[in-house]
């Protein structure tokens, strides 16, 4: 049996964001950009106000996308705001997105047993420094928290991101993004 995780991140709508804690202070969510910062986007959550960081995250029209956050990059988990958690592995870990399943145990057991060949290279890589990573609802700023957040550590280095939409059976479907360590710094 896989150890159950009690920390899942979700929100009422919109994408999730994975970002290094050291860059989180640069994320302003749906708040108006500070210090006369101009944000360019296609999507506008609030057409009456200026474009925001949240709008930039919503511009990602795929399962994943990288965007600038401060002096680093943030990984946007686009499409649906599925409940998401982190499952550590020896060479990185998996962002497990719960599409549908009977319970948490089934989700984690399934995520732990997905064959490597089920994953497809997303073409994206994510660099991790010394800071822990934080998974949060992209609508939130670094200061304002409404939804649960998940903070975790991974080894410093460059990670290739692999993705699978995995249907284990008619009752279990997951969207998983594997961060696989390529180069350790």
Image: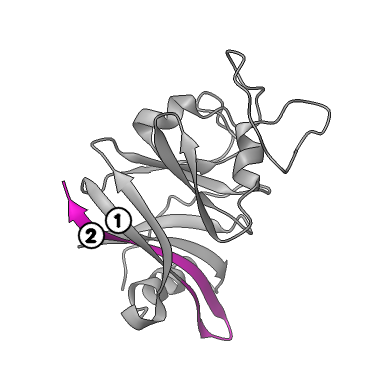
Residue 16 location, x and y as percent?
A: 55, 47
* Label 2 secondary element: strand
Quadrant of the rendered image containing residue 78: bottom right
Q: Is residue 88 visible?
A: no
Magenta region, main secondary structure: strand
Of residue 10 and residue 32, the one placed in the foreground of this image is: 32
In the displayed structure, 40 sits above or below 60; it is above
For mark 1, give the secondary structure. strand
Residue at x 78% of width, y 33% of height: 46
Magenta span includes 81: no
Considering only vertical position in the picture, is 113 above or below 77? Answer: below
Residue to which mark 1 is pinned: 159
Q: At x 63% / y 59%, what residue is drawn?
A: 79
- Asked if the magenta segment contains residue 173, the reply would be yes
**Place of residue 104 in the rendered image (x, y in percent of width and height, measured from the top left):** 46, 66
Furthest residue to the bottom?
Answer: 169
- Taking the spot 57% from the left edge, 13% from the top edge, the residue there is 35
Seen in the image, is 9 located left or right of residue 5? Answer: right
* Camera-nearest residue between 63 and 11: 63
Q: Is residue 91 visible?
A: yes
Q: How many neighbours does mark 1 have within 10 angstroms: few (below 14), some (14-19), or many (20 or more)?
A: many
Q: Earlier in the sequence, mark 1 or mark 2?
A: 1
- Gap in Å between the C-alphas at discs 1 and 2? 5 Å
Q: Quadrant of the N terminus?
A: bottom left
Q: Which residues are magenta?
A: 164-185
Question: Residue 73 is drawn in which quadrant?
Answer: top left
Are dots 1 and 2 in contact, CB under 8 Å? yes
Residue 11 pos. (x, y %): 62, 47
At x 30% / y 56%, what residue is drawn?
159
Q: Is residue 51 above or below residue 115?
A: above
Q: Report the residue marked by disc 2.
A: 182
Q: How many marks?
A: 2
């Amino acid at each position: 049996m896989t150890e159950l995780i009690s920390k899942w991140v979700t929100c009422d709508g919109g994408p999730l964001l994975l970002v290094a804690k050291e860059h989180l202070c640069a994320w302003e969510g749906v708040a108006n950009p500070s210090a006369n910062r101009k944000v360019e986007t296609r999507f506008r959550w609030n057409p009456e106000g200026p474009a925001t960081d949240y709008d930039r995250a919503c511009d990602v029209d795929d399962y994943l996308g990288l965007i600038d956050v401060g002096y680093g990059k943030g990984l946007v988990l686009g499409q649906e705001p599925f409940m998401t958690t982190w499952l550590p592995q020896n060479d990185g870990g998996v962002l497990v997105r719960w599409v549908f399943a009977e319970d948490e145990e089934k989700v984690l057991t399934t995520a732990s047993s997905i064959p490597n060949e089920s994953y497809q290279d997303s073409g994206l890589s994510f660099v991790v420094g010394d800071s822990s990573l934080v998974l949060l609802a992209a609508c939130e700023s670094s200061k304002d928290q409404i939804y649960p957040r998940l903070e975790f550590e991974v080894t410093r280095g460059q990670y290739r991101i692999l993705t699978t939409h995995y249907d284990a059976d008619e009752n279990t479907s997951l969207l998983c993004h594997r961060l696989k360590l390529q180069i350790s710094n």
